[in-house]
Amino acid sequence: MRDPEQEDAEAFIRDFLRELGDKVRLTRPPMIGRTDMNQSATAGENPLNTRSDDTNYWELHLCTAGETIYSDGKRQHLVSPGTGVVIPPGAHCSCLRTPNTTVCQHYWCHFDAP
C-alpha cells in the first residue's frame, strides 16, 4: 500500500463531510486545513497541534507524511502515513513529530456535531 498523497487526503475529507450529509446537522461550517512541519523544529519543541479540555468541536486528522505521536496525557499513539485520528469534543490532546521524522504532514477538519 502506498502512502497517501495530497489528493488522497483532500478526497478523504470531502468524502467524509459528504457522508455526514443530512445525518448530522453542523452548527457552523467545518474548518479544513493542512499542517506541515519540517526538520527546522525539533520533535517535542513545537507541537503540531494542542487542544485544551474546553474545545467544543470534533477533529478528524489524516497523516500523509512522517510519524507523529498523539497524546492525551495518559496514553500515546504513534500515527504514520495513511492513519486517521478522530478527537472528540472536550478531549485534551497534543500531537508531536517523532524524533526520527524530518518532515511531517497531516490534513485536518474541525467540525461541530451536536
Image (cartoon, rainbow, N blue to C red):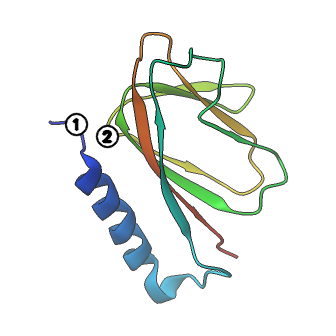
Q: Quadrant of residue 113?
A: bottom right
Name the residue: 56% across, 19% down.
41
Residue 90 position, x and y percent, is: 78, 53
Residue found at the far left of this picture = 1
Q: Distance between the Cα atoms at labels 1 and 2?
A: 6 Å
Residue found at the far front of this picture = 40
Q: Is residue 27 above or below residue 95?
A: below
Residue 97 position, x and y percent, is: 52, 23
Which amino acid type is marked by label 1? Answer: Asp
Q: Quadrant of the N terminus?
A: top left
Q: Quadrant of residue 105?
A: top left
Which amino acid type is marked by label 2? Answer: Gly
Name the residue: 75% across, 41% down.
92
Q: Is residue 22 above or below residue 45?
A: below
Instruction: Please indicate whether residue 12 sits to the left or right of residue 94 in the image.
Output: left
Residue found at the far top of this picture = 100
Residue 35 position, x and y percent, is: 49, 43
Viewer-closest of 16 and 29: 29
> Circle 2 sits in a helix, a strand or a loop, which is it?
loop
Residue 82 numbered tag: 2
Q: Quadrant of the C terminus?
A: bottom right
> Circle 1 sits in a helix, a strand or a loop, which is it?
loop
Instruction: Please indicate whether residue 58 sits to the left or right of residue 80 in the image.
Output: right
Instruction: Please indicate whether residue 47 sits to the left or right of residue 85 in the image.
Output: right
Residue 3 numbered tag: 1
Q: Is the Cβ of the residue at disc 1 closer than 8 Å to that at disc 2? A: yes
Name the residue: 72% across, 57% down.
89
Residue 54 position, x and y percent, is: 85, 53
